[in-house]
Image (spheres, helix red, strand yellow):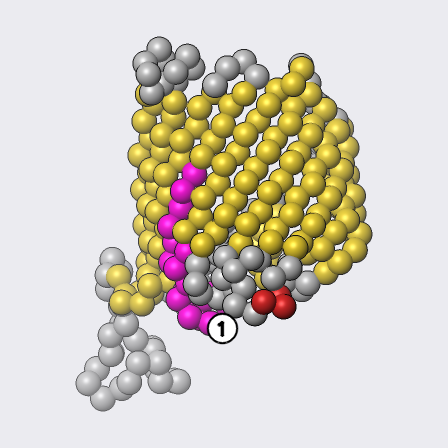
Amino acid sequence: MSLYPYASQPKGEMGMQGEVSYLIKRGSWAGGKYGTQISFNFSLVNDINHENINDTIPIGRPGTLGYYSDFFQLGKEIFYRDFNVEVTRKLNAKWKFSALYQHLKYNQMVLEGKGDMVSADIAILDLTWRIVPKHALRMEMQSLWTDDDKGKWAMILAEYSVSPHWFFSLSDQYNFGNPDESSRKHYLYGSFGYVRNANRIQLSYGKQREGILCVGGVCRNVPAMNGFTISITSIF
């Protein structure tokens, strides 16, 4: 999902988001022993409405107020659309899963300064296996389908954690639907880290794709890279 994240537009935007969650009760066929959580989420962001200040001044002329806009009126240009549904369920004392489907529209020209409107469908399955107390294995599988931009992607990840200090992960992204067959590459990436109190150190090695990368809630454009990365985080 981080292939096409939305970034607020300082020149003006109008957006809204809504979410509905429902818990299927325990003991039912659909709820199972622990209950099943279903969430529906929809968000949209458009340009703001632009109107001429008067009949003789075009919109955006330098030296003028630029334009007039009603505060609650959506503009015609779509910046972003997102609909997703997520199902979360604990199967037993050792296994739980989360499954998510998302459909999005992403105005790449506005948000990145290149390309066109991207329409994509994303499916995610996240499984967690609590092997023994303090030891857990999380497995994640994702796939993105689109005929736009760089085409279809798939990702698989395995993360082993030893609570409360150690974690190890290995992931691979594959651009299997790239229109340029020579660019259908694997991006294999491994890392391990140690956490103690409010301090975290992580060492990673692998191939990083070019594009927008989101880490810790911050998204930025990054170049393609192959090598070592070390990160140290302290909270105080």
Q: Residue at x 60, y 43 (%)?
A: 156
Q: Hey, what amino acid is under mark 1?
A: Lys
Q: Residue at x 57, y 57 (%)?
A: 175
Q: Is residue 234 visible?
A: no
Q: Percent position (x, y) of residue 182?
A: 63, 68
The magenta span reads 100-120
| SS at badge 1 | loop
Q: How many marks?
A: 1
- Is residue 29 toward the left or the right of residue 180 in the image? left
Q: Percent position (x, y) of residue 234?
A: 73, 38
Residue 15 drawn above or below residue 53: above
Does 116 lie within the magenta span?
Answer: yes
In the picture of the structure, the residue carrying the numbered disc 1 is: 114
Neighbours of disc 1 within 10 Å: few (<14), some (14-19), many (20+) = few
Residue 25 drawn above or below residue 78: above
Quadrant in which the C terminus appears: top right
Q: Percent position (x, y) of residue 172?
A: 65, 47
Q: Residue at x 43, y 28 (%)?
A: 88
Q: Residue at x 24, y 79 (%)?
A: 52
